[in-house]
């Protein structure tokens, strides 16, 4: 099957905006085509190599960040707080995982959102749904909701700045690795018994970037041919993923992703059966290359135990090297006090099910995918600080899905660490 960065255009495409101004779209696309890559091929290959290790059972993938980045909420402090939170969580999880914790931020490009409805109606007015700042604006007026291709250029600019900030923080963080590990151990109730954490203290901390490759006009314009590897690469991020609503086997999003060499994530929700999953894997990872594919379950606490065993059993029986991870956020969205929220015990229940099923199916439970922010938001309920329904209004900032705040994200990291350690203890008891 021949492939080009544009071959998705011949396939049925869901969730893409209808741009009214073709000339403006062409102009934005050619500006992006002329721009420098955001993620380099060398970094992309490094991430794949790191995840290949995890796929072989050594280490863990921590992927997290905003549901959607926005133009209005952007700032260096915000990036720094989320960056530090990811580092802290990775250090905690590293205390359990035998191997490296690979850190992948949902940042520097996570702007496009799939929506369940094409339009939104308030009173007598019906307008296109908000699809993320890279497409249109959140305000409920006709001008704001009009898809504007020039927004892709602003999203690209902000991604560039975010990536530069991440690189600067990563270079600075190596100096304090021992402090980060000391804090992680204190949070887990462990004694701090090694003065120098693993790793070379002169090397910047690794932090990769990722987003959902939803807006294919943007992705295509940032796809580059690399002479050395003789491959096409997405340079919009190190890793991209295909969302639950756009994973049709013959759809545009799978067509785009199959032709690029980056690590690809695939969201696996309650409607996915084992046969379709194997066909998707055949399409996306025909060479069964470890580190190429991350399967991200997102079922909801109630459904995970029913759906996950058959899928894991199928990939294991087929000898598939794809890495299994869990997104315990997107299947656990509920409404409370008129707002979309998620409840910590549900998130933790889905995590626990993931680890239990993986152990029973002899699959490596390899990663977690979270919507979270270093800001002190009140969007999810529960956690050690006990956020309650009446607290939701205090600092509810998201335009899309509810995120864990810093304290809740650390609660989840502590739970992940406990689950990894429980699995290791159970395995050594059997041995
Ligand atoms: C997301 O990750 O923000 C998202 C929309 O997830 P999903 O495709 O799993 O619903
Ligand atoms: Co989301």
Image (cartoon, helix red, strand yellow):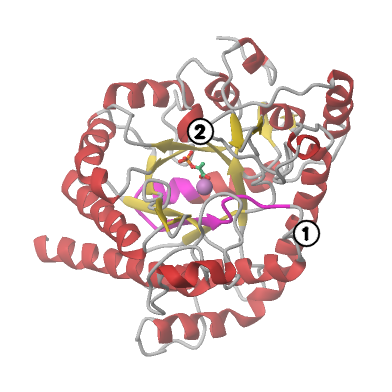
Q: Secondary structure at mark 2?
A: loop
**Image quarter in which the C terminus is found:** bottom left
The structure residue drawn at horizontal position 88% and vertical position 32%, both measured from the top left corner, is 31
Looking at the rendering, the stretch of residues picked out in magenta corresponds to 51-70
Which is nearer the eye, 316 or 335? 335
Where residue 73 appears, as percent x and y from the top left, is 72, 60
Q: Residue 242 got which mark?
A: none
Q: Earlier in the sequence, mark 1 or mark 2?
A: 2
Foreground label between 1 and 2: 2
The structure residue drawn at horizontal position 60% and vertical position 47%, both measured from the top left corner, is 210
The structure residue drawn at horizontal position 73% and vertical position 62%, both measured from the top left corner, is 167
- Residue 199 seen in this snapshot: no
Q: Residue 164 got which mark?
A: 1
Where residue 430 appears, as percent x and y from the top left, is 10, 60
Number of numbered discs on residues: 2
Question: With respect to residue 376, does 26 lie above or below?
Answer: above
Q: Residues within 10 Å of mark 2 (few under 14, many from 20)?
A: few
Q: CA distance from mark 1 to mark 2?
A: 34 Å
Q: Which residue is mark 2?
A: 116
Where residue 400 appears, as percent x and y from the top left, is 57, 49
> In the rendered image, which quarter is residue 418 located in?
bottom left
């Amino acid at each position: 099957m021949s492939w080009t960065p544009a071959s998705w255009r011949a396939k049925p495409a869901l969730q893409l905006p209808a741009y009214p101004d073709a000339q403006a779209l062409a102009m934005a696309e050619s500006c992006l085509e002329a721009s420098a890559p955001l993620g380099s091929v060398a970094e992309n290959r490094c991430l794949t190599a790191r995840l290949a290790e995890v796929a072989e059972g050594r280490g863990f993938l921590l992927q997290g960040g905003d549901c959607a980045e926005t133009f209005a909420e952007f700032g260096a402090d915000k990036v720094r707080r989320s960056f530090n939170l990811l580092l802290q969580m990775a250090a905690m999880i590293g205390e359990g995982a035998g191997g490296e914790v690979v850190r992948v931020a949902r940042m520097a490009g996570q702007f496009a959102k799939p929506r369940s409805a094409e339009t939104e109606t308030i009173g007598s007015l019906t307008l296109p749904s908000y699809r993320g700042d890279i497409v249109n604006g959140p305000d409920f007026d006709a001008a704001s909701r009009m898809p504007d291709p020039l927004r892709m250029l602003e999203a690209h600019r902000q991604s560039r700045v975010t990536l530069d900030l991440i690189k600067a923080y990563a270079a600075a963080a190596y100096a304090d690795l021992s402090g980060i590990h000391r804090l992680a151990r204190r949070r887990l109730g462990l004694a701090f018994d090694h003065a120098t954490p693993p790793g070379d203290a002169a090397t910047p901390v690794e932090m990769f970037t990722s987003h959902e490759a939803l807006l294919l006009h943007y992705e295509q314009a940032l796809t580059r041919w690399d002479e050395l590897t003789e491959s096409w690469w997405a340079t919009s991020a190190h890793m991209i993923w295909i969302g639950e609503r756009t994973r049709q086997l013959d759809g545009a999003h799978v067509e785009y992703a199959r032709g690029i060499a980056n690590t690809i994530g695939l969201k696996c929700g309650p409607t996915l059966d084992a046969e379709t999953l194997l066909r998707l894997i055949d399409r996306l990872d025909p060479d069964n290359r470890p580190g190429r594919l991350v399967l991200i379950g997102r079922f909801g606490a109630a459904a995970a135990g029913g759906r996950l065993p058959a899928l894991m059993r199928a990939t294991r029986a087929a000898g598939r090297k794809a890495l299994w991870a869990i997104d315990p956020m997107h299947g656990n969205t509920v409404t409370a006090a008129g707002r979309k929220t998620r409840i910590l015990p549900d998130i933790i229940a889905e995590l626990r099910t993931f680890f239990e099923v993986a152990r029973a199916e002899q699959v490596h439970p390899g990663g977690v995918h979270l919507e979270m922010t270093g800001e002190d938001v009140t969007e999810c309920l529960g956690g050690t600080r006990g956020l309650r329904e009446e607290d939701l209004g205090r600092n509810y900032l998201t335009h899309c899905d509810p995120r864990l705040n810093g304290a809740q994200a650390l609660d989840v990291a502590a739970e992940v660490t406990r689950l990894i350690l429980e699995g290791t203890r159970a395995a050594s008891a059997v041995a």
